[in-house]
DNA sequence: GGAATCATTTGCCATTTGGCAAAAAGTAAT
DNA sequence: ATTACTTTTTGCCAAATGGCAAATGATTCC
């Protein structure tokens, strides 16, 4: 819980009563590996802060392949980007790739906080922008790098994850096939 | 000017006096092809809405190569992403790839509008999020596509541009070398 | 017009990655 | 332990892309 509050305080001021109010709105959700937090086709009704664990966001492309769009790790929000304007059905799946402990805000809680706390909306919009901004900066250079470099970059960011998730998740994130990734792994050893 | 107002109205309400106020803050800036709107290392002091023309945003990678991060076309804002938190020096260059007519807000104007117009900040943050969101959704599938598909996608979005800008701009955006792009072009005809 | 300069295309070959299928390794259930 | 099932690795070859340098084409400037 402290992680969440510290995270929020990076983006704006909150006094003690406000902090207590935020805390009172949060629910803990434990997710087992492979369970879904949200699914495409549904309108997301909640937002998660990752206290522990790693999520992945995926979608199905035209060819019917499941593509991992990105991973989200601890102390970050799983903002459902495809419905950031709210009320539209998501086109993304959000799934736990490890056991996760999430802190959940329901849509109703968020609106209440938005009304009650001056500056809450500003905090949320900064968080959203920052998350998106980081994704752009992550993705953009990937195009220019070869697959081995992309894999190594992934290893740097998620050192323990690479051998605990299916190859297919990682390969689609890196934009290569499973067998290519398998070969890249072999060559790195 | 009407384009700008219509664009803003997509994201929030503005009454006539507010619209007039916004208009009074805007300055027109004409940029010739190849001129820079902003440069890395400087703290950006203004924000541009593209009335006519196309900009490109670039940076230099570790190897010293200039990489085109993305293109921005008409009726969009050139939000300087790398300094969205403000006050930090940009690491990006923003350059006109065609003659451009821009509508400019200075930082001071923006703060004034922020204070004067209730909901202005909300409009701006929505615009920022939307722009970033679209970039993520653009970039993410590119990784999984081959270079020819990426080139064709670019052609769809900027039909007239491909033959009017240096190959190097486009190749670095697509994540391939100039000669590869040249060959792709040849094969498409 | 001609020289100098810059951008693009092309040839040649090396490297990377894909596609497909079979083998091997790992996992789960009985 | 055996079976069934899933995931990963591997082999083989084709296709895509890179690297480099030379040739060609375009542009600018005098």
Image (tube, coloured by chain):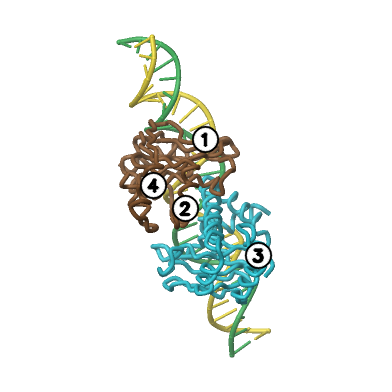
Chain colours: A brown, B cyan, C yellow, D green
Kindly identify which residue carries mark 3: B15
Element type where label 3 sits in the image? loop
Kindly identify which residue carries mark 4: A21
- Same chain shared by disc 3 and disc 4: no
Q: Residue at x 44, y 72 (%)?
A: B43
Above or below, B153 against A65 in this view is below
Frontmost of labels 2 and 4 is 4
Kindly identify which residue carries mark 1: A39
Q: Is residue C1 left or right of residue A164?
A: right
Q: Is residue B182 left or right of residue A161?
A: right
Q: CA distance from mark 1 to mark 3?
A: 39 Å
Q: CA distance from mark 2 to mark 1?
A: 20 Å
Frontmost of labels 1 and 3 is 3
Residue A128 is tagged as 2
Q: Is residue B15 left or right of residue A31?
A: right
Q: CA distance from mark 1 to mark 4?
A: 29 Å
Q: Residues within 10 Å of mark 4 (few under 14, many from 20)?
A: some
Residue A40: name its quadrant: top right
Across and down, in percent, residue D17 comes to: 51, 52
Q: Are marks 1 and 3 in contact (CB under 8 Å)?
A: no
Q: Toward the viewer: D10 or B108?
A: B108
- Same chain shared by disc 1 and disc 3: no
Q: Residues within 10 Å of mark 3 (few under 14, many from 20)?
A: few
Q: Chain of mark 3?
A: B
Q: Chain of mark 1?
A: A
Frontmost of labels 2 and 3 is 3
């Amino acid at each position: 819980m402290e992680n969440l509050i510290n995270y929020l305080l990076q983006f704006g001021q909150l006094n003690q009563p406000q902090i207590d109010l935020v805390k009172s709105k949060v629910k803990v959700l434990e997710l087992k590996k492979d369970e879904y937090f949200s699914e495409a086709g549904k309108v997301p009704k909640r937002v998660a802060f990752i206290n522990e664990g790693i999520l992945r966001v995926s979608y199905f492309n035209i060819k019917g392949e499941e593509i991992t769009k990105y991973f989200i790790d601890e102390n970050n929000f799983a903002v459902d980007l495809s419905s950031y304007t709210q009320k539209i059905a998501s086109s993304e799946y959000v799934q736990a790739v490890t056991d996760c402990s999430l802190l959940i805000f329901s849509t109703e809680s968020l609106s209440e906080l938005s009304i009650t706390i001056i500056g809450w909306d500003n905090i949320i919009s900064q968080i959203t922008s920052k998350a998106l901004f980081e994704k752009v900066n992550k993705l953009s250079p990937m195009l220019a790098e070869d697959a081995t470099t992309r894999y190594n970059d992934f290893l740097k960011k998620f050192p323990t994850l690479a051998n605990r998730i299916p190859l297919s998740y990682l390969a689609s994130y890196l934009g290569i096939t499973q067998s290519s990734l398998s070969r890249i792994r072999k060559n790195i050893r």
